[in-house]
Image (cartoon, rainbow, N blue to C red):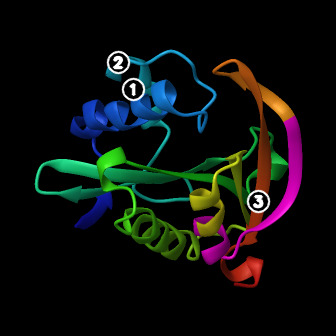
Amino acid sequence: MRIRAAVAADLPQLTAIYNHYILQTPITFDVEPQEAAQRRSWLAGFGTNGAHRLLVAAEADALLGYAYSGPFKARAAYASSVEVSVYCAHQACGRGVGSALYRELFGILAEQPLHRAYAGITLPNAASEALHHRFGFEQVGLFREVGFKFGRYWDVGWYERALGPRGGS
C-alpha cells in the first residue's frame, strides 16, 4: 500500500468509495449518489502543501481509501483549525488503511501552523470512534438527532485533538 496526494485521475475511484457510504450507510448525510464531475470542486479545494490535504491509499491501480483535512469553518479566525475525515473502500475495511492514512495526514498537519483538528462521527460507529481515539481525539460534543436518513434520525458526535507546534502534540 502506498499513500500519496490525490490527483485528478483519482476522482472516479474517490467518488465510488464515497457513493458506497451514501447508499449503504448513515456515515455521510448526503443521500443521492454523486458523479465524479460533481466532486471536481471538492477535489480542487485541496493542495500539495498547506493545511488542506487529500491523501489516498493505493495498491496497484486501486484506491483503498482516502483521508483529508479541510476548513473547519469559513471565517478567518477558524483558520488554525481543520476538520478531518477518512473513508475506506468497503472491501479494504479492517486492513489498517484508515490508520495508515491518518498517520500520514497527522504527520503532515503537525508541520502546519494549526491548533486543533475536529471530526464529526455519525453515531453509533464503533470502528470510527476507536480509530479517532487511537489518534488522540476526545469527544467534545453531541448533536442529537441532527440528520435524517434511512427513515430515522442520527446523532453526530464531535471529536477534537490538538495539532502541531501550537497544539501541544
Other-residue count near label 1 (Cα within 10 Å), few / some / many at <14 / 14–19 / ≥20 = few
Residue 143 position, x and y percent, is 87, 41
Residue 29 position, x and y percent, is 64, 28
Between the C-alphas of marks 2 and 3, the distance is 31 Å
Q: Which residues are magenta?
A: 131-144
Residue at the disc numbered 2: 37
Residue at the disc numbered 1: 40
Task: In the rendered view, tell whether residue 91 sits above or below residue 15.
Answer: below
Quick one: 112 or 23, which is closer to the camera?
23
Q: Name the mark nearer the viewer: 2 or 3.
A: 3
User: Closer to the N terminus: mark 2 or mark 3?
Assistant: 2
Callout 2–callout 1 Cβ contact below 8 Å: yes
User: Which residue lies at the image location 36% right of the left edge and 31% below the top edge?
Assistant: 15
Task: In the rendered view, tell whether residue 32 sits above or below residue 17.
Answer: above
- Give the secondary structure at mark 3: strand
Image disc number at residue 159: 3
Residue 118 position, x and y percent, is 72, 57
User: Closer to the N terminus: mark 3 or mark 1?
Assistant: 1
> Which amino acid type is marked by label 1?
Arg
> Which amino acid type is marked by label 3?
Tyr
Between the C-alphas of marks 2 and 1, the distance is 5 Å
Other-residue count near label 3 (Cα within 10 Å), few / some / many at <14 / 14–19 / ≥20 = many
> Which amino acid type is marked by label 2?
Ala
Q: Is residue 142 magenta?
A: yes
Quick one: 74 or 55, which is closer to the camera?
55
Q: Quick check: can you spot residue 96?
A: yes
